[in-house]
Amino acid sequence: MPLTTLPDWLDYQQRVHPRAIELGLDRVGEVWRRLGSPRPAATVITIGGTNGKGSTVAFLEAMLRADGRRVGANTSPHLLRYNERVRIDGVDADDAALVGAFERIEAARGDIALTYFEYGTLAALLLFAQAGLDVALLEVGLGGRLDAVNIIDADAAIVTTVDLDHQDWLGNDRDSIGREKAGIFRDGRPAIVGEATPPRGLLEEAARIGADLRLAGRDFHADVRTTDWSWRGDGVDIMLPPPALLAPCQHANAAAAIAALRALRAGLGWNPEAIARGVAKAEVGARLQRYISAPELIIDVAHNPQAARVLATWLRAQPAAGRTHAVFGALTDKDVRGIVEPLREVVSCWHLAGLAQESPRGFPPTALLERVRSAASGVDAADVHDDVEGALAAAFAHADRGDRVVAFGSFFVAAAALRFAQTRGFGAA
């Protein structure tokens, strides 16, 4: 059957490779060579890390566009539409452009099997190369060293944070994971690390590569005050407005983005006014996204222990008038205990959602209930639902006006919650 629509192509891509994930650069690199290996932009920045990648891309995109630069951003996963993964000059790629790129990739690959993610990465690179971009921002999908985006030698690379996630692929400790994430660094090129206490493995791998390492807390600093903050480093100190993104970690993400722009100033210039406008304007969905409703709805993509700790910190700092209801679902490779433990004293009621409609790797709700009760001893206020919509409906039915509902645990949960909010006509806070 001919593949003519974007849904046709996406369905095909999920069937053409026997595994959803197969790390390695040989296959995808060979297809890229067959496509001519065009440079995606005059300047390329690759962004990796356990958490904060999407937010850091958003900061970079907003800052660069405020300076008049033409920017492409490749991110994953998407929330509501696949097209979100490829954005050029602030606009999502349309179906026809993506289909055209997939047709070129299919003609070039021959008998080389590609994963769903690899098709998408190659499509983004092709579309960027055609667009005459000043800067391409490439978000790592998983790890770094063997991720498909690493076929491109970036002019600068950022690792936002390193924590435990995807251990089946990356290793069981921060040192091992840090080594994998440092694989996006290049000899002699700026390598920005967004956390002040990175694992030794990342530092050792950066040194082995010969990267120009720039560390948060050593080479650049985010000095946060009550109503504003400043970025300090490399002999400059610029005053900045609060980030539009709410989580306290967003100052660190913005600071890493600024450090990359400072490192690349010879080619991109240095415009503190544009940086300030970008900090105040940058937005990305489902990062403590708030909706005005009764009760209030908060949507976050927190899906690993580090992200859950950030979410818990923000919830404690912004206490609800009443109870906090959690709508939670997770994939089976996630550390449920590590996610639940930071939130057990913040959450009053748990509404647990199955994700079978979204992924075969979703935790069945009854199994998830066992994990949650094991992680948060004494949890009695918990119910289970086949899907996220059912869990959200139950949360709103049980909540009072002064309560709040927090939906988190997976991009699938966040996407379903966004659709729920749109259907109910909730307004953005």
Image (spheres, grey):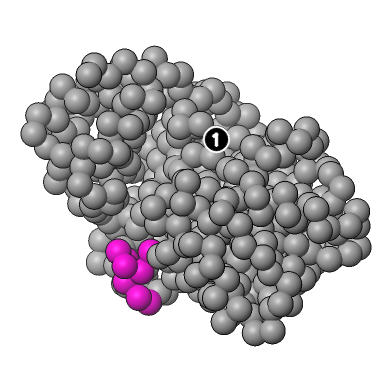
User: Is residue 368 left or right of 143 when viewed as pictured?
Assistant: right
As drawn, which residue projects farthest toward the bottom?
377
Q: Is residue 235 above or below residue 107?
A: below
Q: Is residue 237 above or below residue 74?
A: below
**Residue 364, percent across and down?**
48, 62
In the rendered structure, which segment of residues is drawn in magenta? 166-173
| Occupied quadrant, residue 250 | bottom right
Q: Is residue 45 visible?
A: no
Q: Nearer the viewer, residue 331 or 315?
A: 331
Q: Quadrant of the N terminus?
A: top left
Q: Is residue 337 visible?
A: yes
Q: Nearer the viewer, residue 153 or 149?
A: 149
Residue 57 is one of the magenta-drawn residues: no
Indicate the secondary structure of the residue bearing disc 1. loop
Q: Which residue is mark 1?
A: 80
User: Is residue 11 left or right of 252 when viewed as pictured?
Assistant: left
User: Is residue 269 left or right of 422 when viewed as pictured?
Assistant: left
**Residue 27, percent across and down?**
15, 42
As drawn, which residue projects farthest toward the left?
111
User: Is residue 238 left or right of 96 when viewed as pictured?
Assistant: right
> Which residue is depicted at the point 73% across and 72% down?
381
